[in-house]
Image (spheres, helix red, strand yellow):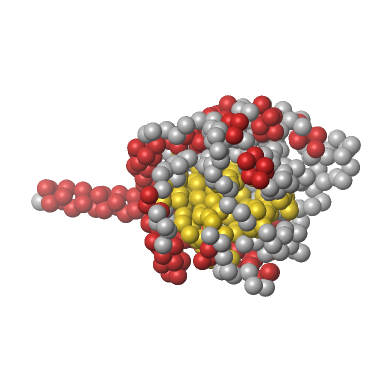
């Protein structure tokens, strides 16, 4: 149980599979997972593959149905806490990756300012893969507690380990936080009350316009990094018979089908220890099965909740913990002032499989001390908050603008050729052109 001296934060990462969420199922799973817990003060959703590429790249109203499903799910899940009325504070996406932050209504007024950032790490810097960051200033008495949340989606495939590490580097270099406003928010996130209140929050930010652009690491900020990081348990694809050894439900760790045998080969754990990715971040102990890749049969069974007797895996991918949530512990200069202080992790687990995705959502319930991180003296031994592993890209803004133009073009082409609505437009144009040609031809023959 998190103490009153902590801000309780719930973070969920979920690869949506480009499908519309089923709010009732997601809300029930979330309520069951949090049964017996205190309600969170802040709720954060890290979302990947929110919608098909056409809608994700075009953005705006095309994303309304996809984001709206999560608003409905959070509203329904909040009822499980009795007084769980959560208000959307900020929503932002870069292509197919998005982040939504809710605050309980009792904490909404304590958000003093908001900053946001976004970067694409996909093809030519586009947002088929990428990261979105939202940073909040939360009022604690006369101080401001800074919280940075980053939602990310890195390169897929077993053999793409180097690319995933490179994606992390691009995220650190390309995520530059600047003061946000409601124009950054997709239409789906703008409920009438929320839009006005967000503008008021930002308008009342003391000196908000004077804050300099900052990267993912900040001396005074907590950092939570969540997403489909895509680190696998093998560097090669499975052989035809390997699926026979895939994990299955068993409580006996010595059983060869227990998932802990596969966890030993986890790429992220290895790369973290080697200092090649997610520098300075740490993760709570994993005591849940792999979150990816479940078969179509598994998704069909998820509709009825019958997923516990057997895990149905896709045979062409190694079961892996692709979906992860990491965080920065308190900095050494704060621990020196407050011996024994630290981040409290109450729960780190995977939710059940949903019918709309081959990933299981992952949940982290944590407590952050209600005390602002003080400004350090000196370099503090090269702490990552003071000396990030990579500097910000000086051309980050120009690169994002160029990538955004490409996203709109790709989104338009995908809309025309990959959606029923676009196909209808093309058909109408073709019929119109054919009709025009027939009319002109008939006129010339007269």
Q: Position of residue 124 (x, y in %)?
A: 42, 33
Q: Position of residue 308 (x, y in %)?
A: 79, 52
Q: Is residue 183 left or right of residue 346?
A: left
Q: From the viewer's side, name the closer residue of 201 and 78.
A: 201
Q: Hey, which quadrant is residue 21 in on the image?
A: bottom right
Q: Please count the marks in the image.
A: 0
Evaluate whether residue 252 shows in this view: yes
Q: Hey, which quadrant is residue 397 in on the image?
A: top left
Judge whether 391 appears above or below 444 on screen. Answer: above
Judge whether 320 appears above or below 23 on screen. Answer: above
Residue at coordinates 30% horizontally, 49% vertically from top-left? 430
Q: Is residue 123 left or right of residue 323?
A: left
Q: From the viewer's side, name the closer residue of 440 and 258.
A: 258
Judge whether 322 appears above or below 436 on screen. Answer: above
Residue at coordinates 45% horizontally, 49% vertically from top-left? 116
Q: Is residue 5 left or right of residue 116?
A: right
Q: Position of residue 407 (x, y in %)?
A: 39, 42
Residue at coordinates 41% horizontally, 44% vertically from top-left? 212
Q: From the viewer's side, name the closer residue of 344 and 35.
A: 344
Q: Position of residue 252 (x, y in %)?
A: 89, 42
Evaluate whether residue 244 shows in this view: no
């Amino acid at each position: 149980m998190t103490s009153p001296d902590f801000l309780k934060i719930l973070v969920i990462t979920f690869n949506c599979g480009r499908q519309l969420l089923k709010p009732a199922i997601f809300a029930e799973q979330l309520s069951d997972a949090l049964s017996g817990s205190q309600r969170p003060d802040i709720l954060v959703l890290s979302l990947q593959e929110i919608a098909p590429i056409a809608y994700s790249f075009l953005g705006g109203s095309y994303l309304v149905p996809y984001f709206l499903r999560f608003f409905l799910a959070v509203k329904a899940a909040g009822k499980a806490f009795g007084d769980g009325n959560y208000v959307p504070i900020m929503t932002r996406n870069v292509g197919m990756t998005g982040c939504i932050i809710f605050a309980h209504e009792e904490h909404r007024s304590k958000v003093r300012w908001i900053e946001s950032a976004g970067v694409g790490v996909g093809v030519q810097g586009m947002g088929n893969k990428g990261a979105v960051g939202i940073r909040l200033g939360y009022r604690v008495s006369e101080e401001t507690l800074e919280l940075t949340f980053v939602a990310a989606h890195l390169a897929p495939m077993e053999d793409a380990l180097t690319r995933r590490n490179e994606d992390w580097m691009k995220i650190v270099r390309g995520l530059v936080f600047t003061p946000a406003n409601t124009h950054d928010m997709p239409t789906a996130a703008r409920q009438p009350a929320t839009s006005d209140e967000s503008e008021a929050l930002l308008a009342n930010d003391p000196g908000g316009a004077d804050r300099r652009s900052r990267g993912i690491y900040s001396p005074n900020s907590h950092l939570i990094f969540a997403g489909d990081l895509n680190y696998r348990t093998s560097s090669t694809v499975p052989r035809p018979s390997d699926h026979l050894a895939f994990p299955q439900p068993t409580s006996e760790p010595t059983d060869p089908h227990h998932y802990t045998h596969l966890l030993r080969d986890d790429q992220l754990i290895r790369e973290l220890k080697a200092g090649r990715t997610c520098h300075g971040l740490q993760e709570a102990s994993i005591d849940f099965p792999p979150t990816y890749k479940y078969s179509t049969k598994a998704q069909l069974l998820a509709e009825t909740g019958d997923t516990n007797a057997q895990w149905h895996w896709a045979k062409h991918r190694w079961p892996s913990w692709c979906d992860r949530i990491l965080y920065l512990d308190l900095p050494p200069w704060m621990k020196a002032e407050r011996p024994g202080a630290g981040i409290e992790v109450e729960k780190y687990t995977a939710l059940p499989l949903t019918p709309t995705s081959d990933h299981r959502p992952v949940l982290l319930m944590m407590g952050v001390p209600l005390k602002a991180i003080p400004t350090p003296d000196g370099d503090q031994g090269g702490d990552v908050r003071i000396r990030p592993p990579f500097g910000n890209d000086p051309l980050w803004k120009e690169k994002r603008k160029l990538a955004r133009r490409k996203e709109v073009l790709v989104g338009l082409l995908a809309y025309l050729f990959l959606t029923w609505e676009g196909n209808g437009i093309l058909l109408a144009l073709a019929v119109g052109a054919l009709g025009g040609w027939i009319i002109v031809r008939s006129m010339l023959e007269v």
